[in-house]
């Protein structure tokens, strides 16, 4: 049986991880590659690197990061952050990324999903959706969740699947940073409507939250950042605990 | 280990990830083949691939490598390992396209089909365990609990059950690896499957 995936997310700026990380056994805790390798060793199933560098030479820094990760890490990884064209995706995949994640650029130009899926195959196109509930309606947000759009989240999720996305990374801005649990209701209603896998993100605070998002939320994978970086939860402990709760995970 | 391993590069696979993993497996002589000559001189071949079936076949055709590959694989019996799409290309055809495959394995490639829509996710994406269908040098000293990383929407269906090497379950039992004489194919990505993938690539390099 396919296992549920645990995915640490690393935010990277100018080649360094942001968000304070505290790993005394790393030579350079700011080095995304070394931190990624450690997570891989600990049993992370995949990694996501989000490059939040905002420079004109964006693609160069992105590709450089991908190349370093690919040379050192032997589990799948996704790269995201400002990817907006066939050329960007091509450069990342050629440098060794397994998947790319697009967000605002897909909202701005939905046809981009079609052309990327046609060119590179659905399996490597992840569409990230940032969602926030606005007076009872789930709306897609862009620009790191700060800008509301008029697009409703569930119809958008269906549309991105139809356009050829291979996976959805769903981040609930209402839950992100709260450590009060994932958006299980919304995640579940999207997961049950779609055939492609859903990665749930935002709200992880304790190990039970992961059980909940896999059972109630019907997520295929769960992504978290700070709880792993600050070692509030360690991946081997989490995975053994999930296995004890009857969730199918890779523990070896 | 002086054998030279050629990674067949016609723009359809993540060549560098496979190369990195082979180097970790202790292979020094990894060639990325960009010419017919590279392929002709190799002791072992690896055909990685991602993307669609027809795209893969049309690239092999465009590079005019099918003839030299047929000669290497069928006449000289050079060991070849197909990965993901590269494994599907070893079959005769695919529901994903109209072009004929390489046909070295008596099998076809079909799309996942579940009785109820949305019953299980497509692509089959993530870590899955495998069931060994026969003995193989490829699986020597492999951890019984080994898991591999899969990402695919189509799978191989063998006409001859004797060619089946590994199976996996996603809704139903699928073929996860095939082996017929010198031709081996794995549906998953050993280059992304951590220590298990490393072991498998090591075995291909040293045991074939």
Image (cartoon, grey):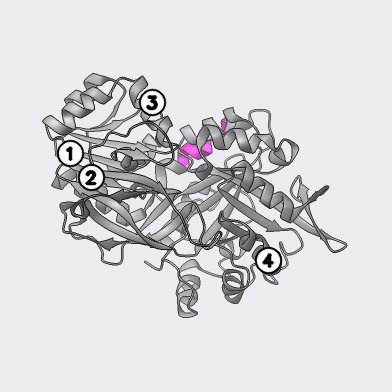
Residue name at image x 58 percent, y 52 percent? A10
| Depth check, front residue: A76 or A38 | A76
Count neighbours of disc 1 (C-alpha within 10 A) and say few if under 14, some if 14 to 19, many if 20 or more. Answer: many
Q: Chain of mark 4?
A: A
Query: Disc 2 versus disc 1: distance between alpha carbons?
Result: 8 Å
| N-terminal label among 3 and 1 | 3
Secondary element under disc 2, as helix, strand or loop, is: strand
Count neighbours of disc 3 (C-alpha within 10 A) and say few if under 14, some if 14 to 19, many if 20 or more. Answer: some
Disc 2, disc 1: CB below 8 Å?
Answer: yes
Disc on res. B184: 2
Q: Which residue is mark 1?
A: B79
Query: Disc 1 versus disc 4: distance between alpha carbons?
Result: 49 Å
Residue name at image x 50 percent, y 53 percent? B122
**For the magenta stretch, what is the residue range?**
A60-68
| N-terminal label among 2 and 3 | 3
Q: From the image, state whether disc 2 or disc 4 is nearer to you.
A: 2
């Amino acid at each position: 049986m396919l296992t549920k995936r645990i995915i640490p997310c690393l935010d990277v700026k100018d080649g360094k991880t942001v968000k304070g990380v505290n790993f005394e056994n790393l030579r350079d805790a700011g080095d995304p590659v070394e931190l990624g390798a450690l997570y891989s060793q600990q049993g992370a199933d995949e990694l996501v690197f989000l490059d939040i560098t905002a420079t004109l030479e964006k693609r160069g820094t992105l590709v450089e990061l991908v190349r370093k990760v690919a040379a050192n890490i032997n589990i799948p990884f996704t790269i995201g952050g400002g990817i907006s064209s066939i050329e960007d995706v091509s450069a990342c995949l050629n440098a060794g990324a397994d998947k790319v994640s697009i967000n605002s650029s897909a909202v701005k130009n939905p046809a981009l999903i079609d052309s990327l899926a046609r060119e590179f195959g659905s399996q490597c196109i992840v569409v990230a959706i940032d969602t926030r509930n606005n007076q009872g309606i789930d709306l897609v947000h862009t620009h790191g969740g700060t800008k509301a759009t008029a697009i409703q989240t569930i119809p958008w999720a269906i549309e991105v699947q139809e356009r050829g996305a291979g996976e959805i990374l769903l981040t609930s801005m209402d839950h992100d940073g709260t450590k009060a649990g994932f958006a299980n209701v919304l995640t579940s209603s999207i997961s049950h409507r779609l055939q492609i896998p859903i990665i749930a993100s935002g709200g992880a605070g304790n190990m039970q939250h992961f059980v909940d998002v896999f059972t109630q939320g019907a997520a295929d994978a769960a992504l978290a950042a700070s709880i792993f970086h600050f070692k509030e939860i360690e991946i081997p402990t989490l995975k053994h605990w999930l296995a004890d709760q009857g969730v199918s995970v890779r523990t070896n | 280990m002086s054998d030279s391993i050629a990674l067949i590069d016609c723009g359809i696979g993540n060549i560098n990830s496979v190369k990195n993993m082979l180097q970790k497996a202790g292979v020094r002589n990894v060639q990325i083949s960009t010419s017919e000559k590279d392929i002709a001189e190799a002791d072992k071949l690896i055909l990685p691939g991602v993307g669609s079936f027809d795209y893969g076949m049309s690239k092999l055709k465009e590079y005019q490598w099918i003839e030299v590959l047929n000669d290497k694989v069928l006449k000289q019996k050079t060991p070849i390992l197909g990965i993901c799409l590269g494994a599907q290309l070893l079959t005769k055809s695919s529901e994903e396209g109209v072009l004929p495959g390489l046909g070295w394995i008596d099998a076809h490639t079909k799309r996942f089909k579940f009785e109820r829509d949305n019953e299980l996710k497509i692509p089959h994406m993530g870590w899955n365990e495998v069931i060994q269908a026969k003995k193989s040098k490829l699986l020597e000293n492999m951890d019984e609990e080994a898991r591999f990383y899969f990402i695919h929407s189509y799978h191989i269906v063998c006409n001859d059950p004797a060619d089946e090497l590994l199976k996996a379950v996603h809704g139903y039992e699928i073929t996860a690896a095939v082996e017929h004489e010198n031709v081996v194919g794995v549906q998953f990505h050993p280059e992304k499957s951590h220590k298990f993938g490393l072991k498998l690539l090591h075995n291909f390099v040293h045991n074939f």
